[in-house]
Amino acid sequence: MTKKSWWQKHFAREEQQEKIDVVKDLDAIVEYLEEINYDVKSILPELKKLMELEKERKVADSSVTHINLETQASILDKLLEKYEFFQNDADINGLRLKAIANQFLRNAKKHGLTDLVKEKKEDKRWKFFW
């Protein structure tokens, strides 16, 4: 065992294993996926309205273009808010899934499945660059 200098002992962060409740996280992911349809159903009509308004704007008389653009701004406000929530939920659940996969690797290593762990760590999907 190598000796650490006094500053390393004093300031080094102790590495702690993340406490992952796999079942709880999987339940949260399932709940999120079950609710995606509601998010999509609220976003799609707004996107379709925006598409129609943009088509109209391209052929509209300049006297009504400002009304069209104000309406588009209103729809975009709604879309940006809904999409932000949607994106945040997707990101959070992606982080949960990555944590679950890391916990799996720790469990597999602990139970002697070193070949499986090595195989998964070489797989680009298990490097979590997504």
Image: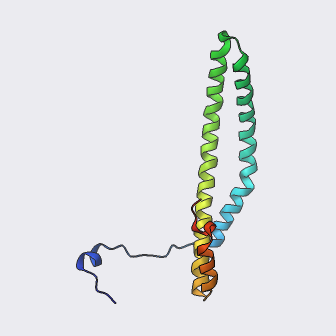
| Left or right relative to 85: residue 15 | left
User: Can the viewer see residue 21 in this picture?
Assistant: no
User: Can the viewer see residue 58 in this picture?
Assistant: yes
Q: Name the residue rendered at 73%, 45% in the picture.
A: 40
Q: Name the residue rendered at 65%, 37% in the picture.
A: 79
Placement of the N terminus among the 4 image quadrants = bottom left
In-front residue for pair 104/21: 104
| Left or right relative to 41: residue 76 | left
Q: Name the residue rendered at 61%, 88% in the picture.
A: 111
**Above or below for 62 versus 79:** above
Q: Residue furthest top?
A: 63
Placement of the C terminus among the 4 image quadrants = bottom right
Residue 74: give x, y in percent of width and height.
63, 28
Residue 61: give x, y in percent of width and height.
70, 11
Color scheme of the displayed model: rainbow
Classify residue 95 by image quadrant.
bottom right
**Above or below for 63 versus 109:** above
Tally the numbered discs: 0
Classify residue 51 by image quadrant.
top right
In-front residue for pair 120/5: 120
Q: Name the residue rendered at 73%, 16% in the picture.
A: 59
Residue 42: give x, y in percent of width and height.
73, 41
Residue 14: give x, y in percent of width and height.
38, 76
